[in-house]
Each structure stands twice: as structure tokens, then as C-alpha cells.
Image (tube, rainbow, N blue to C red):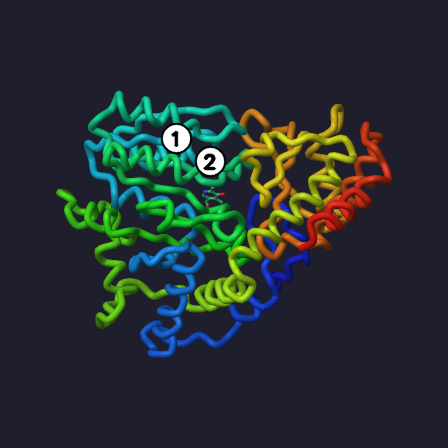
């Protein structure tokens, strides 16, 4: 007989979803009201301004798309790119590869510049590509590559794209709320994020923001956007301000309660405090992992605090370790992808998961399991190293 599903209580320290704060889970269970109810419409407006704060933008067109981060990605591409366009995609991991797929499905030509996995996008390569492809209309890249834990320099890349009169599409799914992201100051034209990483909300929504330049491009399209659901010309009528709201689709009402609460929490904490919190827990986790003898994939200068990618100790079956962490400690950490599959772990410290209990649980559980498997690690030092780090960089 099918029964009510009761999920186990886990600690989520993978590449997403991250731990959801109890306040957000509570918000999700509040009574459903109509999506054109004035009370709900007022909450939609407040959600937009909270999103503007999170993105550090005044862009009017700043809304959550009613589908996960991948749909935010698709929203940017289908609206800004037309068949026949040339689009430069900077690829340094899994999510850059998905951008190429998006460009192709728009009937456009991707011009791919590649950097090694674990390295940031090289601005010189972008400069060269733009010189060699003067007809390119758009440049797309990932701010925080979740497959490798590397950060690319958004401002520099956007400046170069603008020198060549290109729009920019930036993937900020893992960066929003976790590291500095300044949409207006950096001049980003179109950006998308997700709710399940550093916002610590449930998966399934994708905040996006478009500036005037991007809106101009959308309005001057020769062809219709091929996706009816993601066509911003239609979505704007639903989320737009001062207009009578036109029915487009039924918003995921309760999911939006959750997003509103998570953005409110970010606002109450303060963006900079959130960035600092991610950094101090990252430094403590890092100190513990390094004390055990593990090393990071990504150079310190461009390492993401919210996604720690470390090599697993030599001779250890890393999948077995992850499976024991899950079954014995209810702790989820992520596996490596692509060329790093079987070689690294991806340990997330995203949003509500970025806290001291999690750092300590992860270090002690890892140490215990690794020691039990006779891995070549230094024992009894990780938690002390983490505490020393907290003493130096308080939360
Ligand atoms: C998780 C992620 C996505 C996809 O988001 P979903 O919510 O899983 O669709 C896109 N880009 C990056 C960088 C991500 O980390």
C-alpha cells in the first residue's frame, strides 16, 4: 500500500539543494490563496523588490521564473538570442556546456572559448574571440561554476563584452547570496539564479533580472520567442508593475511564499553579512580539511567559499565514503563531475547550510569514516584547526 512519504532528516552539504531553513518550510505550508488576490499581488511586488536587493539592481524586470534555475537559463537565451546570431560562450565546466546547448537550440551559432575545469574564464581569450567574431551579439558565462568551485571575474568579462557591443548573459545560480554580486555596478545585462543554492529555499524557482539594454534587444526581435511559456513579453504582463495583471500562468503560490521568506531572511541578515558568513565557515572547513591532509582543486584567488572542491585521499573509494556519510551520519556531500569524477568531493556551504554545526559535523564524520577505512589522513586535528580559524575570522 502506498503511504505518506516521510523523508529522512538530512544535512545537505552538496552542490544543491542546500539545507532549507525551518522558517522557509513553515512559510511553504501557509494557506494557499488565489494568484490574483490583492494580498498575493502585494507579496509578488515585495518579492520583486527583495530580489532587486539580492541582485543589487534597480532593474524593473527582476522576477522569479516559475521553474528551476535551468529555466532561468533558458529564459535568458530564448529571449535574447535569435536564429542566425553568433553567441560567444565561455566554457569552464558543466554549466557552460549547457549554455552551448541552449544557443544551438535557439538556431544560433555558439562560438566556444574553453578554459580548463577548475580555472576561471580567461578574459584574454574572450577579447580574442570578440576580435575574431565582430558579428557576435551576446557573451555568456558562469559566475560560480558549481561543477568545479571556481569563480570568474564578472565585471572584467562584462566590460570586454560591452567594448564590442555585446549583451551579456550571466549564470548566478550558485553565486547569489553567497559571494559579492552587483548587477548594476558590473553592468550585467541578463542574469539568472536559483532558489536552492545560497538562498536556501526549496528548488523550483529561478530569479532573473534584465536591464534596459536587454529589454531593448527583446523588444526589437525580428522573430517571436519560440517558447510561449518563457516569452518575457508575455511574462511581463503578469509580473509588471502598475498594469492590470494579465493571466499568464498560475504562479506557484506556496513556493513563492518560501522564496519571499528566504529573501526576507537575506535582507534581515544583510547581504554583506551573508557573504562574510559564507567566507568564515569556508575558512574553517578549509582549515579542517587541510589539517587532515586534503587539498583544494581551485586556486585560492578564485575559490568559491560556498562550494569546496577537495581531492579525496589516495587509495580511498570516495563513493563508499559518501555513501557511509549518508547512511551513518545523514550527511550529503557531492561527487566530482567530468574529469574529476571519482577524484574529488564537492562540499557545499550554501545558505542555511553555511553554519558551524555543519562544518563540525562534516569534519568529524569525514575523519571518523576515513580513519575507519584506513585512509592516509592526519587524525585528531581537524576540529581544532576549524576552531582556530573561527577564532581568527569570527562569524
Ligand atoms: C544548479 C545550477 C544550475 C541549474 O539549476 P537547477 O535549479 O538545478 O535547474 C545552473 N547553473 C549552475 C551554475 C548551477 O549550480
* Looking at the image, residue 287 lies above or below residue 253: above
Which quarter of the image is occupied by the C terminus?
Answer: bottom right
Q: In this picture, is 146 found above or below 125?
A: below
Query: SS of the residue at dot 1?
Result: strand
Badge 2 residue CB within 8 Å of ligand 1: no
Judged left or right of residue 46, residue 298 is: right
| Left or right of residue 357: residue 75 | left
Image coordinates for residue 212, horizontal then vertical, percent: 24, 52
- Residue under the image location 32 percent in, 22 percent down: 128
Instruction: Report crowding for label 1: few under 14, some 14 to 19, many 20 or more residues within 10 A (C-alpha).
Output: many
- Residue positioned 57% across, 66% down in the render: 25
Q: Nearer the viewer, residue 376 or 272?
A: 272
Residue appearing at x 60%, y 62% in the figure: 21
Q: Which mark is residue 283?
A: none
Kindly indicate the quadrant of the structure image that contains residue 80: top left
**Rendering quarter of residue 9:** bottom right
Left or right: 36, with 375 as reference point: left
The residue where tag 2 is placed is 152
Of the numbered discs 2 and 1, the one sitting upstream in the chain is 1
Identify the disc placed on residue 90: 1
Q: For mark 2, does the 10 Å Cα neighbourhood hold few (<14), some (14 to 19), or many (20 or more) residues?
A: many
Q: Are marks 2 and 1 in contact (CB under 8 Å)?
A: yes
In the rendered image, the residue lying farthest to the front is 392
- Residue 150: x percent and y percent? 53, 35
- Quarter of the image for the N terminus: give it: bottom right
Q: Nearer the viewer, mark 2 or mark 1?
A: 2
Please determine whether, in this image, residue 285 is positioned above or below residue 129.
below
Q: Position of residue 288 (x, y in %)?
A: 75, 40
Amino acid at each position: 500500500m502506498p503511504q505518506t512519504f516521510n523523508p529522512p532528516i538530512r544535512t545537505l552539504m552538496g552542490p544543491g539543494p542546500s539545507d532549507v531553513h525551518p522558517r522557509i518550510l513553515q512559510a511553504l505550508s501557509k494557506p494557499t490563496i488565489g494568484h490574483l488576490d490583492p494580498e498575493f499581488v502585494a507579496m509578488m511586488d515585495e518579492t520583486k523588490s527583495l530580489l532587486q536587493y539580492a541582485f543589487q539592481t534597480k532593474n524593473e524586470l527582476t522576477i522569479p521564473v516559475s521553474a528551476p534555475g535551468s529555466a532561468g537559463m533558458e529564459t535568458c537565451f530564448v529571449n535574447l538570442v535569435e536564429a542566425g546570431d553568433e553567441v560567444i560562450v565561455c566554457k569552464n565546466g558543466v554549466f557552460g556546456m549547457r549554455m552551448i546547448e541552449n544557443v544551438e537550440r535557439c538556431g544560433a551559432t555558439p562560438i566556444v572559448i574553453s578554459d580548463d575545469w577548475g580555472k576561471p574564464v580567461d578574459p584574454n581569450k574572450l577579447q580574442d574571440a570578440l576580435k575574431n567574431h565582430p558579428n557576435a551579439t551576446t557573451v555568456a558565462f558562469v559566475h560560480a561554476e558549481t561543477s568545479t568551485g571556481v569563480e570568474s571575474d564578472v565585471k572584467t568579462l562584462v566590460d570586454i563584452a560591452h567594448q564590442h557591443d555585446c549583451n551579456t548573459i550571466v549564470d548566478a545560480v550558485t553565486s547569489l547570496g553567497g559571494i559579492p554580486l552587483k548587477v548594476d555596478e558590473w553592468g550585467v545585462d541578463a542574469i539568472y539564479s536559483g532558489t536552492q543554492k545560497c538562498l536556501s529555499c526549496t528548488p523550483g524557482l529561478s530569479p532573473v533580472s534584465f536591464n534596459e539594454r536587454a529589454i531593448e534587444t527583446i523588444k526589437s526581435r525580428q522573430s517571436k520567442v519560440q517558447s510561449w511559456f518563457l516569452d518575457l513579453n508575455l511574462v511581463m504582463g503578469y509580473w509588471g508593475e502598475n498594469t492590470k495583471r494579465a493571466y499568464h500562468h498560475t504562479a506557484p503560490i506556496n513556493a513563492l511564499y518560501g522564496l519571499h521568506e528566504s529573501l526576507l531572511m537575506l535582507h534581515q541578515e544583510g547581504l554583506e553579512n551573508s557573504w562574510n558568513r559564507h567566507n568564515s565557515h569556508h575558512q574553517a572547513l578549509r582549515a579542517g580539511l587541510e589539517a587532515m591532509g586534503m587539498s583544494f582543486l581551485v586556486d585560492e584567488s578564485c575559490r568559491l567559499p560556498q562550494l569546496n572542491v577537495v581531492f579525496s585521499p589516495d587509495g580511498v573509494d570516495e563513493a563508499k565514503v559518501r555513501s557511509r556519510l549518508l547512511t551513518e551520519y545523514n550527511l550529503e556531500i557531492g561527487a566530482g563531475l567530468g574529469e574529476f569524477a571519482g577524484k574529488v568531493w564537492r562540499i557545499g556551504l550554501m545558505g542555511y547550510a553555511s553554519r558551524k554545526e555543519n562544518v563540525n559535523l562534516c569534519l568529524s564524520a569525514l575523519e571518523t569514516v576515513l580513519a575507519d577505512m584506513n585512509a592516509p589522513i592526519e587524525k585528531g586535528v581537524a576540529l581544532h584547526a576549524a576552531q582556530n580559524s573561527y577564532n581568527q575570522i569570527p562569524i
